[in-house]
Image: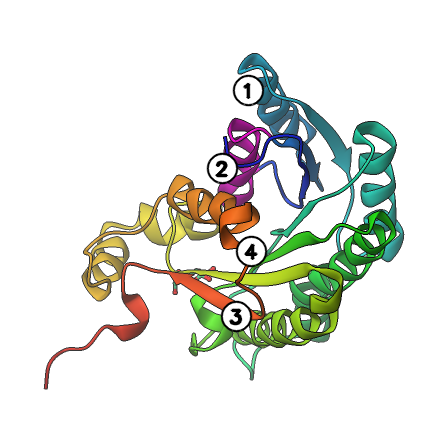
Amino acid sequence: MLLENKVAIVTGGDSGIGRAISIELAKEGAAVTVNFRHNEQAANEVRQQIEQAGGKALVVQGDVSSVADLQKLVDHTVETFGRLDIMVNNAGMETRTSTIDSTEQDFDTVIGVNLKGPFFGTQFAAKQMIKQGDGGRIINISSVHEDWPMPGNSPYCCAKGGIRMLTRNAGVELAPHGITVVGVGPGAIDTPINKETLAAPEKAAALNHAIPLGRVGEPEEVAGLVAWLASAKAAYITSSTYFIDGGIMQGSVGL
Ligand code: BGC
């Protein structure tokens, strides 16, 4: 197992990519705090699945755009499992609104969840890891859209661009403490965020066609990369992003 005796937090661990990450980290031996905002039942199902497989899990409610909730998340984890080794800033959402159409509320909500959350999640996790004195891993779930426009999803792209620089900046700042900060940039993955697109046959076909590997990814495929990045095997990786996108960012019609 890659993560024996490690303790991890996964924000938005009840759904989509976060759910798969929670289960995968536990499978590799980590005790996992599964954070959720709305869906307690889904979070409890993840906890049960982990426990049934012989792992350890804790469920903590919290909105990552609230610094008080993030502090509570770290505190509960440390009270329960004694320490924190791996922070996965995963929770994310999108409004699919353009630069012209986005309201102040669209912007604030998306930036709050997708950028303020990872920023203070990184800060609180790093403070705890520095106190422990033996390093740690912070993994920010970004997107191909940290670096690649998605017309009609402007606040989301702005937030992901911010995560890109959070990963780079915090990685440099925290390196002297042995804490690595790594971004994971998924492409189109079969999760609730893409439910509408995937439910419309024409849209789904267009999406699959745009992906060189010809299909959307599975949450478990992203989770496998995250578990590896969280492990000792990835000790020399920091301040950069790993894309896992079936080649979508490099898609070319071959002019
Ligand atoms: C977005 C999806 C989009 C995918 C590929 C993700 O970050 O959340 O809506 O389909 O990127 O463009």
Dot 3: element: strand
In the rendered view, would you say 103 is above or below 58? below
Q: Earlier in the sequence, mark 2 or mark 3?
A: 2
Dot 1 and dot 4 residues touching (CB under 8 Å): no
In the rendered view, would you say 50 is above or below 33? above
Name the foreground residue: 71 vs 172: 172
Q: Residue at x 56, y 84 (%)?
A: 100
User: Callout 2: 10 Å neighbours few (<14), some, many (20+)?
Assistant: many
Q: Where in the figure is residue 11, as x and y percent of width and height?
A: 67, 46
Q: Where in the figure is residue 196, as x and y percent of width and height?
A: 40, 50
Q: Which residues are magenta?
A: 15-29
Amino acid beneath label 4: Ala
Q: Provide the residue designation for mark 4.
A: 235
User: Callout 4: 10 Å neighbours few (<14), some, many (20+)?
Assistant: some
Q: Provide the residue designation for mark 3.
A: 240
In the rendered view, would you say 239 is above or below 80? below
User: Callout 1: 10 Å neighbours few (<14), some, many (20+)?
Assistant: some
Q: Earlier in the sequence, mark 4 or mark 2?
A: 2
Q: Earlier in the sequence, mark 3 or mark 1?
A: 1
In the displayed structure, does residue 30 sit left or right of residue 202?
right
In the displayed structure, does residue 112 sit left or right of residue 49?
right
Q: Provide the residue designation for mark 2.
A: 20
